[in-house]
Amino acid sequence: MALTTIVVGCDLSPPSDAALDRAAALAAAHRARLVLVHALADEPPPGQPDNALAAKLGEVSAAVRAAEAVRLADKLTALQQRGIAAELAGPVGPPGEVLAQIASAHDAELVVVGTHGHTGLARFLLGSVASATLRHAPCDVLVCRGPGGGVFQRPLVATDFSAAATRAIGHVAELLGPRDNATPGASSRSIDLVHAWQLPTGSWGATLLGQARFPWSTVRDAVLSSAKGQLDRLVASQANLGVELRGELIQGPPASVVTAAAERGGHDVIAVGTHGHRGFRRLLLGSVAEDVIRHAPCSVLVVHGEHAGETARFRKV
């Protein structure tokens, strides 16, 4: 997955500005085209306003649009002065949906959106635009948290050894940028993998038989041995990526394990894979992916499946 076109939501809010900084850094590293999307609200007028109210509302709306146009033009000029091929799109419609539409029209490989804060209660508020973009996007979505700027240096991939999780490894490796564009002074390119393992349902019953007859550690050792074997095979299969893969097996619920590992390791992005081809308009990401996105202490790269974006043909529910 080479990055040639990146779409970024730009509503001029602080989270959006942070997302734009990150998208600009990625575009510069990959020499990719950057499309700024500033969706224009398509709101119906208030019910039966009198002429004076309608005129005043029109004046306010025009003033806001004019101020936004100036700020957007300034951002576009600043990007172009940095040598980034950037353009601006201002479609009318719900932001999450139009971001997906622009990404599809431009054959983008990545959509970048901002979300709320990364500490306290705000950390769990994904935001309607980010949520809608995740449901409709035809490509990977990067949900940015925290200050932007620079190419990611410490990625973490959540793996359950599925094809979707393996795809996420390749995509986050691409996100690190070409090897010849590595940040001066940065450590060697590496990706940490984490797999959350749990004892099979019902294995607790072995303890009822007594430690002498059936030690529970037998089940634990078997589960760990299987997981280690899968992890070793996964690392070996990705040798051609040109990055060092370091795996860790941690017992516990997957979402909790992943977010805690990211916080403990100081990772700046978590990559999660999703199937992305469920037959519903709301595109079910899966409970683990959704929990990681909402609880992550850093940015999250959501790697959609090969059929992402096809949900529009299904009945809306």
Image (cartoon, rainbow, N blue to C red):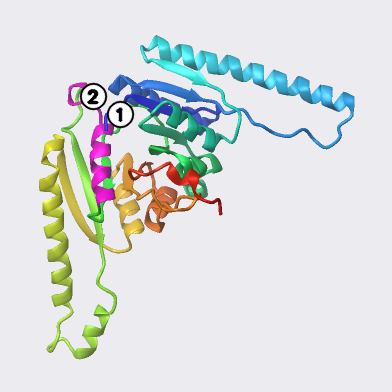
Residue lying at the far top of the rendered structure: 81
Residue 151 tag number: 1
- Horizontally, is 77 left or right of 316 in the view? left
Q: Where is 72 relative to 226, above or below?
A: above
Three-letter code, disc 1? Val
Residue 269 falls left or right of residue 74: left
Within-10-Å neighbours for mark 2: few <14, some 14–19, many 20+ = some
As for residue 232 lying within the magenta part, the answer is no
Q: How many tags in the picture?
A: 2
The image position of residue 25, as x and y in percent, is 35, 24
The x, y position of residue 254, in whole percent, is: 32, 59
**Residue interval drawn in magenta:** 163-181
Q: Mark 1 and mark 2: span between their CA atoms?
A: 8 Å
CB under 8 Å between discs 1 and 2: yes
Dominant secondary structure (helix, strand or loop) of the stretch shown in magenta:
helix
The residue positioned 21% from the left and 45% from the top of the image is 192
Circle 2 sits on which residue?
183
Q: For the point 55% across and 43% down, which residue is it?
A: 128
Give the percent coordinates (x, y) of residue 258. Answer: 31, 53
In this picture, is 246 found above or below 106?
A: below
Where disc 1 sits, the SS reads loop
Question: Which part of the image, by quadrant, shows the C terminus?
Answer: bottom right
Q: Is residue 25 left or right of residue 127?
A: left
Report if residue 116 is visible in the image.
Answer: no
Query: x%, y% of residue 160?
Result: 25, 56
Q: Which of marks 1 and 2 is nearer the N terminus?
A: 1
